[in-house]
Every structure is written in structure tokens, then in C-alpha cells.
Image: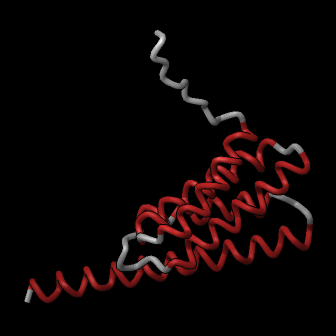
Amino acid sequence: MAKNQKLSAKRQHKDATVELARLNREMAVKLMELANQTGDIEPLIEAVQALRSAQEYYSPENTPIENAIVQKKLGDILFKVGKNEHHERALKHAVIAYRGALTLASLLGDHKLRASIRQNYELALEYTGEKRIRPGLSLKG
């Protein structure tokens, strides 16, 4: 009997986790729509935070690819705003959104999406000044 209760509790936890991820994704989309209507970036930053708050619960079994796609789109929007309006906070959160999207694409094994995100992530890092250029090796010493 105790084993059945434990299995039931695990199943309920998994279902709740899937639901939480879905709700956070929906909230992020609504916040993106709000930002589009108002021209304010605060809802976009809140969307990044909403998506990141559930990220610790993700696993390959319960994470739809849409979560990575939404995070990438969010990163794209924040990067565009940050680049065009010289808005450092938007650029910083674009990097955060791209990192989340990269994590999910890797977790889900979507190499094509991961490559696309990685390209945008590298550009965002350049704009924030976070990208470190690795010194090349020299045979001359």
C-alpha cells in the first residue's frame, strides 16, 4: 500500500511539474504580448524570470520544445531592443534568456535549434562585452 502511495505522489509531482512549466510558458507569452502593446521592456524581463523559475524542474520527459522556442524568441526580442536602443538591461536579460534556451535545447537534444540559439547568444555576449576572445596559440612563444 505504501508503495502505491509513493508512486501516486511521484506521478502527481510529475504532473504538477509539467503544469508549472506550461503555465510559466503561457505567462511568458502573455508578458511578451503586453510588452509589444506597451513598448515597455519590464514585462519581457518578468517573462525571462518566469521561465527561469521553473527551469530547475525540467527533464527530457516533461519539457516541450516550445519552452526553448519561447525563451529563444524572448532573447531575440530583448537583444533587438538592447541593440537598437542601447539598453544594457535588455541585453543582459537577452543573454539570460538565450542561456535558458540553450540549456533546454541541449536537454532535449535539438541540435539544430541549439546551433541557432548559440549564434544569437554569441552576438548578445559581444554586445554586452561579456564575450571573451580567447588568445590564439602561438608556436613562436
Asked if residue 36 lies left or right of residue 54, the reply is right
| Identity of the residue drawn at 54% across and 59% down | 100
Along the line of sight, which residue is nearer the eye, 109 or 21? 109
Percent of width and height locating residue 65:
52, 77
Percent of width and height locating residue 123:
70, 48
The image shows a total of numbered marks equal to: 0
| Identity of the residue drawn at 65% across and 35% down | 130
Residue lying furthest front in this view? 140
Percent of width and height locating residue 106:
44, 63
| Identity of the residue drawn at 48% across and 66% down | 104
In the picture, the quarter occupied by the N terminus is bottom left
The coloring applied to the image is secondary structure
Above or below: residue 94 compared with residue 140: below
Percent of width and height locating residue 32:
77, 71
Along the line of sight, which residue is nearer the eye, 23 or 104? 104
Along the line of sight, which residue is nearer the eye, 31 or 119? 119
Residue lying furthest top in this view? 141
Above or below: residue 108 compared with residue 132: below
Asked if residue 122 lies left or right of residue 54, the reply is right
Asked if residue 128 lies left or right of residue 66, the reply is right
| Identity of the residue drawn at 69% across and 51% down | 93
